[in-house]
Image (spheres, grey):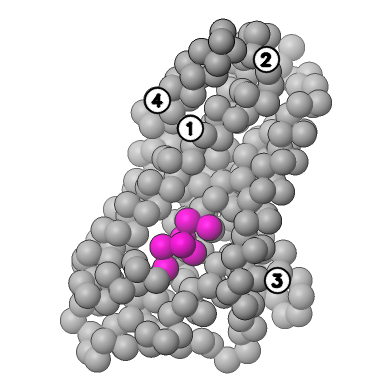
Amino acid sequence: MNSLRAFAALLRLSFRRLLWSVNTLMVLLPVTGCGLFILRRGFHKLTPPETAFDAFGSFLLFVFSSFLIPICALGFGTTALGAEREEQTLVFLLTRPIPRWQVLLAKILASIPLSCGLVMGSFACYCWLVGPVGWLALKIYWPAMIGMTLAYLALFHLFAVAFRHPTMLALVYALFMELFVANLPGSVKRLAINYYGRSLLYGLGADSGLKVPKGFEIVPMTQAYGMLAGITVGCFLVAFLFFQWKEYRDLT
């Protein structure tokens, strides 16, 4: 019972700390900027609807899913545990009478609603600004957006557990390495989360007017969902195992 109360207290503290952090403000800046871009672009004025859907879909592919989703997941995924390590407060958590796996679980559970809530909240606002075409996009794309968010979040939690400066590594990975890998020919691009997300968006939006570029190999939707789920579960499991046995010598 004491362990359960300690876990609940850590979960509440972690959630409040992430919510009222500088990272939240930093993530809100590009989210607001994209909203202003949508207003200026005027997707709702494009005709016919298929053209508007294709234009909005391109924004979702190359800006929202490739930039905003990783940034939202990075802002909360690497900070949840990484901030404790950077501020030398992780040692106090590890000496408390609470199992290590519960410490990491509390950090993960605190970051999931914030990351997914910000992603889906901004996505819904963008769709509202676009109008009927946007509501169609929200209806068909929301599972892909959540799947990508969870996959990035799991990977960035693994970075936070395994590396000393996870935020910098996650930035390099999300904004440079993954975009480079996802556009490579052959099977190398299958290592990138973005590739499976793009495959889902192309597959889900093809019937509504989203054009698939020539040369892009779409993964079947069941396989894309399976890979995102596998990356999420696999990264979380490895993070738990790593956190359970790793000695953080830099804290002493």
Q: Residues at badges 2 and 1 in contact (C-beta under 8 Å)?
A: no
Q: Dividing the image into 4 quarters, which one contains the C terminus?
A: top right
Examine the structure image and report whether residue 190 is included in the region drawn in magenta.
no
Circle nearer the viewer, 2 or 3: 2
Q: Secondary structure at mark 3?
A: helix
The reply to whether residue 124 is in sight is yes
The residues bearing labels 3 and 4 have C-alpha atoms spaced at a distance of 37 Å
Q: Secondary structure at mark 4?
A: helix
User: Eyeballing the image, is 5 above or below 51?
Assistant: above
Image location (x, y in percent) of residue 191: 72, 64
Q: Which mark is residue 94?
A: 2
Mark 3 crowd level (few <14, some 14–19, many ≥20, 10 Å Cα): some
Circle nearer the viewer, 3 or 4: 4
Mark 1 crowd level (few <14, some 14–19, many ≥20, 10 Å Cα): many
The residues bearing labels 1 and 4 have C-alpha atoms spaced at a distance of 8 Å
Q: Amino acid at mark 3?
A: Lys
Judged left or right of residue 57, residue 152 is right
Q: Which mark is residue 110?
A: 1
Q: Which residues are magenta?
A: 141-147
Q: Secondary structure at mark 2?
A: helix
Residue at 62%, 56% in the rendered image: 229
User: Eyeballing the image, is 118 above or below 161?
Assistant: below
Residue at 61%, 23% in the rendered image: 103
The reply to whether residue 169 is in sight is no
Give the mark nearer the N terminus: 3 vs 1. 1
Q: Dividing the image into 4 quarters, which one contains the N terminus?
A: top right
Q: Residues at badges 4 and 2 in contact (C-beta under 8 Å)?
A: no
